[in-house]
Image (cartoon, rainbow, N blue to C red):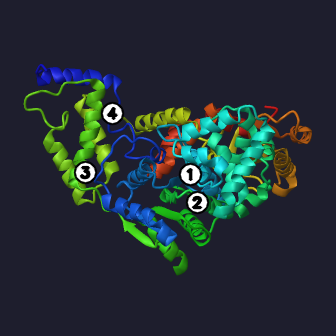
Amino acid sequence: MTDISQEELFSKFKTARESIPNPFRIKSIVTATEVWGAVQSEIPSLHLDAEKTILAAIRNIKDIGKVGILISADAGIGKSHLIHRVRENLESKGLGIFAYIPPITEPNRPDFHVRYHLVDSFTRQNNAGISQWEVIAARLIGTAKAKNYSKYVELSDNIPSLREFILMEHKFMTHFEMMDFIEKLASEIAKPNRLKKDFVKAVLLLLFENEKEAKFADAKEGALSWLQGSDHEEGITAAKLPRYPLDQQQGVSVSFISELCLLAEAASLPVVICFDQLDNFVPSFDCKYTPSQVAAFCVDRLHLQCKNLILITSAVTTRLMEIKALDPATLARVSERSISLNPPNATEMYELVRQRLDWFFKKADLDLNVENLSPYYPFQESEIVTLVTNLERGKGNLRNLMNKCADLFEQAGGKPPKTDLELFLELYEQNLVSLNKKKPKNNDDEIAEILRFCLTHLNEESGGVKLTQIEKGKDIHMVICGYDSAHTKDVRIGVRVCNTGASATFNAVMNRILNYSKNNLTRGCLVRSEPIKSSWSRGIKLKDDLLAKQGEVVVLKENELFPLIALYQIFQQDQEQDKVLGLIKDSRIIVENPLIQEILSAPNG
């Protein structure tokens, strides 16, 4: 390797800066989305004692049955980093299965929210492309005792081989014959394990979740929808599972979660449910409890009714008093084990800086074999020592460290400091790229909350309407109150997001939108991504009735929704939320968003 001068290195460094992002701004330490998959930086020593405490509880779940763990820490010191490592341990060592619960968007339906995201979490795949549902299904098959299932039991440790063998053995079966096979296998597993057969059957169908086998198509989608509480009329019928009306889904959600925990127990897999980001969310409309308290009550209900369960509640120190203000019995169940995270030490902060710089120079393919070069090039070593020392004295915050290093990195490259708006738009674009890559699934309540957030912070006229207020609707998601300048009149627009695949549920939702008098509406608005099926004659009639009453159906498109989700994520994850709201306004992303404009504008223009 040939030595180069510092002048040559700096020239190459400046060139690399033109095409490679600032390594201290590429991602947060561990964002909510990075709890799954790889992270940008890994610091094994960070919160190691806390990690060991949680893993010990997981390993001992057979003896203790259930446990509530409350994690508290100041913002920005690595709570999500810890959660990521716990999840990674569960996956790599086969210790259990993991569910990540984001902020509860509808305080009146928290149990449904948890159930929805638990089921969604179990669909996450590992590096081998295996979902947690497939792991549970294979483990359950491994418990079958009848001799005619001995080959399945033998293959249950190798999921691809097990799935391939079952498909090959039954390749000439019709859909009905295949469902009969699943029914019998479910009965064989359910009875000795004292499980409900419908749940076993639904999970067995998810062994074929990613197969394109036609005989499973509707049934496996129906099984997932049934477990999640979503409507998929044809699929749930094909899977021979009982249907629950939409208004019953909240009420049955805890019992569903309880039964899934029992299935996992029969498969020798503890269930870990983690509630995170309690500090970053303001609940919709009127709610007498804070987000932290809503989550704590949810944890309490699960603790009372489930077993084989580890419940992790992660809260910033400022929210801890809200949880502690609850009744002693609830607090005792939420915090059977209490963990307080310490700030990172100097060694961990130096390691983080080093990792980010290594990433940049590896990307740039730059040779650092230069005499008398700072170990933190392009920074002076004294700069980093001073920075880390000051942060450590003030209870070091990893986010602050990243922000300060990012500014120093810009200066080192001879670039003028970026404005707050430029930095905001960079983060927005990163989020947008991630969303387009991962294509997240959001339920109706979450989409409605994102729309409500964006409409609430729409500070100027859009779609010809100047907003004055957003109200909670009766049987609909919200009522937008404003002034239509084009038609010189006040408007009250009732909005309901509904992506159901069940005609009965769709009809019920449409009837609620059409009841203008209940919410004193001037027009109704259905927001939906899928077209209304041609076979839904009643649904089509209701849609026509909506149009006749000056209402509209707004088509929900990913390329219009994802920018709003990206803004919502930034707001949730930033500690300076007032500042973020100002930047959102300056960016004009909401006011110029076609989805927002379409919802607000009159159907006839």
Image quarter hosting the N terminus? top left
Q: First in sequence: mark 1 or mark 2? A: 1
Q: Is 536 or 493 nearer to us in this picture?
A: 536
Disc 4 marks which residue?
A: 22
Query: Mark 3 to mark 1: distance in Å?
Result: 39 Å
Q: Residues within 10 Å of mark 2 (few under 14, many from 20)?
A: many
Residue 148 drawn above or below residue 462: below
Disc 3 marks which residue?
A: 348
Q: First in sequence: mark 3 or mark 1? A: 1
Q: First in sequence: mark 3 or mark 2? A: 2
Q: Is 456 or 13 nearer to us in this picture?
A: 13
Tag 3 secondary structure: helix
Residue 394 drawn above or below residue 504: below
Q: Comparing marks 3 and 2, which lies closer to the viewer?
A: 2
Disc 2 marks which residue?
A: 266
Q: First in sequence: mark 4 or mark 1? A: 4
Query: Residue 371: percent from the left, percent from the top?
Result: 7, 28
Q: Comparing marks 4 and 3, which lies closer to the viewer?
A: 3
Residue 311 drawn above or below residue 408: below
